[in-house]
Image: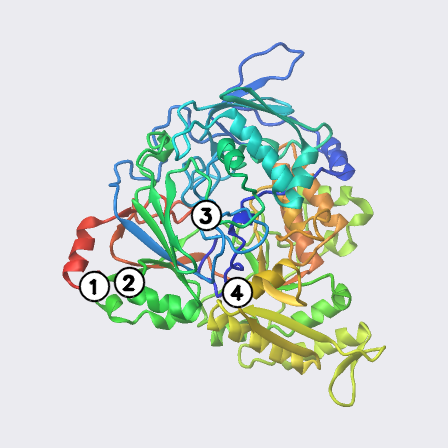
Amino acid sequence: MHQGRDTKPAVGTAGLLSIRHVVQVSAAGLLLAALWASPARPETQIPETQASEPRIIVAHGYSFYGDLTYPPDFEHFNYVNPDAPKGGEISISWQGTFDSMNPFTRVGRPAYLSSSMYESLLETSEPMGGGGVPADVYGESYGLLAHTVEYPETKDWVIFHMRPEARFSDGTPVTAHDVVFSHNLFLEQGLPSYAQGVGARVTGAEALDDHTVKFTFAEGISRRSLIDQVGSTTVFSQKWYEETGARLDQSRMITSPGSGPYMLDSFEVNRSITYRRNPDYWGRDLPQNRGRHNFDVIRVEYFADGAAAFEGFKTAEYTFRSENNSRQWATGYDFPAVTRGHVVRDELPVGTPPAASGFVFNLGREFLQDRRVREAIALAYNFEWTNQTLQFGLFQQRASFTQGTPLQADGPPEGLELELLQSLGDLVPEEILTQPARMPHTSSVERLVDRSNIRSATRLLNDAGWSIDANGVLRNEAGQRMTIEIPVSSAGSATMEALVETFTQNLQQLGIDARFQRIDAAQYTDRRHNRDYDIIFDQYGAFMDTGTGLHQRYGSEAAEFSLFNPAGLASPLVDAVIDASLMAPSPEERDAALMALDRVLRHEFFMIPAYYNDTVWVAHWDIFARPSDETPPFSTGYMDFWWFNAERAAELRAAGALR
C-alpha cells in the first residue's frame, strides 16, 4: 500500500480487509472462455498420469499459471539478511480508537494488527505474518501451514498436506479439522458478502486425516482464486472456540490463540498494544522465515489525531513513522533529533500501483446517477492548485486504476484488448472502442477557482436540468436545491481537511449547497459503513492481477453492501470485463482484460481521481537496519525483514536521545 498520502483508510476496517469476497462468474465470462480458447502455460511439478485423466500438480506453493520463482529447496527469500540479529523493539503509531481485539468483528473498531497473529495454509501478506508471500514477486504464495499443494490441472479440487509440527501459541497442534472448522465459521459468522460468494463456489471442505484437507469447487465457474481463496483463509483453534463459546462476528477483548510468529502481549484500550515474538514459534526455521520477524516486540501507540501522533514521534514515544502528510514531510522535519542525525528520513520506491484514491460519488443518490452531474462536480476539483498550494508540489495526478504499470490504458484499445471489448457487443459504448482512455481534467495552478472549468460545469448542469436561480442557488426543475455533504474524520490530517474544504468552496461557486463535516473517527467509520454521505474521500484497491476480489470492489453482485465499493458501482460492462479476466487462459489475455478493466472503470467515472506518490515516505529513529539500500518492489518490510541495531540504540541512549 502506498504511503506518502494526505489521507488513510477509515479506522476500524483492518480486520475486514483480510476477508476476500468471491462470486460466481457470469455467462458472459463463460462465453469469453470459449472465445479465448488457447493452450495454457505448463504447470510446475506435474507428475505423469493416464492420458484420459487430468494431470495432477504437486508443488510447494501456488500461482495460477504454475510459475513459481523459488524452487522447492530454496534457503531463504533473496532480499532478506538470513543472519539478521533478533531482538529489540519497533514501535509505530495508529490514529483513532479501538474497542475489539477480534479483527473479524462486524461491529466496532478492531485493534491495529490484530489479524496478524493468525496464519493460513498458504501465506497472505500480513505485515507480521509467518512467511510465504515474497516481496520480490507477484501472484505467488508458498506453503505455510501446508507444505504441499496438490490439485488437478482442471483445478476442480485441491488437497493441502499440512505440516504436523504446526502449533497454536497455546501449544496445541494445528490440524485439518481446525481448517475445516475455520472455513465453516467464516461462512456462518463472517461478512455476508464472503458467505454468499464462497458458499456458492466452494462446495466441500473435508479433513481426510489430521493433517490433510481437501476442498472441492463448483462446476461451471472460473478456476481463478479458488485455490488462493481457501489457501489464504485464516485458521483458528476449533478447541478454543468451542470451549469459550466466542463468536467470530462479535466484538471482544480476548483473543483466540494464533499460530503466527507474534502473540498479543498486552494492551491499554485506546492507548497502546504490544505484540511479542513467540519464542516457541513452530515455523521459525522454515526457509521463508529466515531473516524475518526479527523484533522481539512490536508496539502500537494510539493517538487522537495526526498532530498528536507527530508530536509523539518527535519525543520518541514511538520510533518508526510512515508519513502521510505532505505538509509535515515538506516542513515538519526540522526538529533537533533530525538535525543531530538521530532521526533519518527516506523515500522508498514501490512497485505496486498506488491505491485509487479520490472523491467517491455515492451512486445511491439519485442526482449523482447522472454522469453529467458527476462530470460537472469533478470540474470543481483543482488538482494543480491544491498540489502546489496545500501539498507543496509533492504529488502527481492519478489517472488510472493501474497507474504506472504496463496494465494502464492510454490510447485507443488495440490488439487483444480491442478484440475482447469488441466481443462484448452492445455492452461497450462506441467511444470506448475508438477514443483514448479517459484522463482527468486540467485546472489553473494560479488560482483555486478555474473560471473556464466553472463555466463548463455550469453548461453540463444546465444540460442535466439544473440551473441557477436569481439568488445564485442551483436548483432542478422541481425547485429542489442540490446539496452535497462530505464527511471528514477528525483523526485525519489538517491538509486533508483543507483539501476537502477548498473543494467545497469551488462547489459553492456552482450554486451547490456544499459543506464538509468534521466528525470523530467512530462516527466517520459508522457513516462510511452505512454509506451515509453524498461524496467521500476514499479509495479503491488498485490491481496488478485478476481475482474474484475484483467483484467485491467493483462488481454488481455485492454493490449494495460491499464495504470495499464505497460508490456502490454496479455496471454490467465492468462485470463482464472482470469475468473475462477470470477466464483468461494465458497471462497475455489476462493482462489485456485488466487493461480493458482500467479503461472501463475510468469510463464509468464513479470517482474524481486525486493525487498519488510513487514512493513511500518513512522516518525513523536511527536504531534500525535493513538488508541493503534497495527494497523489494512489493513491500517496505519494516515490520518484516528490518532489524534492531542494538549498538546504535545504545549510542542514542547515551546521548540522551532515547529513554
Residue beneath disc 4:
521
The CA span between labels 1 and 4 is: 33 Å
Earlier residue among tags 4 and 2: 2
Do tag 2 and tag 1 residues touch (Cβ < 8 Å)?
yes
Question: Between disc 2 and disc 1, whose residue precedes?
Answer: 2
Tell me if label 2 and label 3 are in contact, CB under 8 Å: no
Q: Which residue is mark 3?
A: 114
Label 4 – label 2 distance at C-alpha: 25 Å
| Camera-nearest label, 1 or 4 | 4
Q: Are marks 4 and 2 in contact (CB under 8 Å)?
A: no
* Residue at 64% across, 11% down: 51
Question: Residue 316 bears which disc, if any?
Answer: 2
- Report the amino acid beneath label 3: Ser
Which amino acid, by three-letter code, is at mark 4?
Ala
Verify CB contact (< 8 Å) between mark 3 and mark 1: no
Q: Earlier in the sequence, mark 2 or mark 3?
A: 3
Identified at 57% across, 65% down, the residue is 524
Q: From where the camera sits, is residue 64 visible?
A: no
Query: Distance of mark 2 from mark 3, alpha carbons?
Result: 23 Å
Residue 113's label in the rendered image is none
Say the numbered circle drawn on residue 657: 1
* Label 4, residues with CA under 10 Å away: few <14, some 14-19, many ≥20: many
Residue lying farthest bottom? 470
Corner quadrant of residue 287:
top left
Q: Residues within 10 Å of mark 3 (few under 14, many from 20)?
A: many
Using residue 574 as the reference point, say whether residue 243 is left or right of it. Answer: left
